[in-house]
Amino acid sequence: MSENISVLGLGLMGTALAESLLAAGHQITVWNRTPAKAEPLLARGAKQAATPEEAVAASPLVIACLLDYPSVRATLESASPEGRVIANLTTGRPSEARETAEWVAGRGGEYVAGGIMAVPQMIAQPGALILYSGSRAAFERYEGALSAMAEPRFTGDDPGMAPLLDLAMLTGMYGQIAGLLEAAALVRSAGYPLTDFVPSLLVPWLNAMAAQQPLWAEKMASGDHSTQVSNLEINRAGVANLVQTFYEQGVKPDLLLPLKAVIDQRTARGLGHEGLSGLIEEL
Ligand code: FVH
């Protein structure tokens, strides 16, 4: 079913979102602070709103994808969200999403927060995912249209949930990047080719380790941190050895030291018999 949808924000991501909605046959109205960025979309049939107010008035579903939440609030300030669903796909904090949901509800609108788990090139491609939370009724009303951009997944009535999960996913990613950077620095210090180490050794190893993470999730959810593999004491000695190796190779282990500190803290409490999953209790 073709829907009228307004898109606020035509940066890299907003443009990709608007393109995917146009390609799916929806009637799109766009607004961007810098109007010239709308031109390619206008050539493909989108309409341009002169102001955010005009864009919000044009469609019952308004998708915002701007720099940050303050820019969204400033953009929406003079628009009336009454009778509108505001789907804000801008990255933000859970507290910002909850405040904005209240602000929209206080003006007679419905609010859905989103977390985009994709880069612009992935939009409308298999593997792209957008997390949503907030008004379940609004999400269900527009789930079909939203699926043109990426697989939509509703994560709860709390508007802060999708942003929190988005940030948690990014946290996992940054942890992986930290591991990659430290490992690569160590390998480079020994003159081994990174173009061999990363694809043929590190990536298969990380994939094998990632396959264990659902079991970790069960442990962390239950609070049962018993282990049949390396306990914390073994890991404490292992990470100390690893850090020492970095110093000997002239490489800074700065991204590993916070992990070492938490392992040391947990074992100092006499919990060295537990598995690594027990570290969650220290956090
Ligand atoms: N690009 C990505 O890979 C990531 C993937 C995950 C989700 N993010 C989030 O998406 C939001 C937008 O990101 P973006 O990549 O589209 O960013 P830009 O290309 O830099 O476009 C920014 C747009 O925001 C407009 N804008 C900036 N400040 C203001 C303001 N004060 N008032 C109104 N609009 C503002 C900007 O307008 P202009 O510069 O073209 O006039 C762009 O439309 C972001 O939350 C990511 O974290 C993307």
Image (cartoon, rainbow, N blue to C red):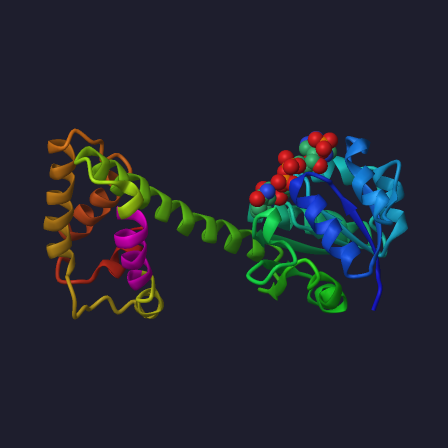
Which SS type dominates the magenta stretch? Answer: helix
As for residue 236 lying within the magenta part, the answer is no
Quarter holding the N terminus is bottom right
- Residue occupying image coordinates x 36% and y 68%: 214
- Residue occupying image coordinates x 84% and y 64%: 2
Q: Nearer the viewer, residue 36 or 265?
A: 36
| Relative to 6, 269 lies left or right | left
Q: Is residue 70 visible?
A: no
Q: Nearer the viewer, residue 193 or 144?
A: 193
| Relative to 11, 229 lies left or right | left
Q: Nearer the viewer, residue 4 or 165?
A: 4
Q: Is residue 151 above or below residue 193?
A: below
Give the magenta range. 197-209
Q: Position of residue 160 (x, y in %)?
A: 58, 53
Q: Nearer the viewer, residue 61 or 10?
A: 10
- Residue occupying image coordinates x 62% and y 64%: 151
Quarter of the image where one finds residue 216: bottom left
Which quarter is ligand 1 in?
top right
Q: Is residue 77 above or below residue 97?
A: above
Q: Position of residue 118 (x, y in %)?
A: 56, 52
Q: Position of residue 190 (x, y in %)?
A: 16, 36
Q: Is residue 107 visible?
A: yes
As for residue 206 lying within the magenta part, the answer is yes
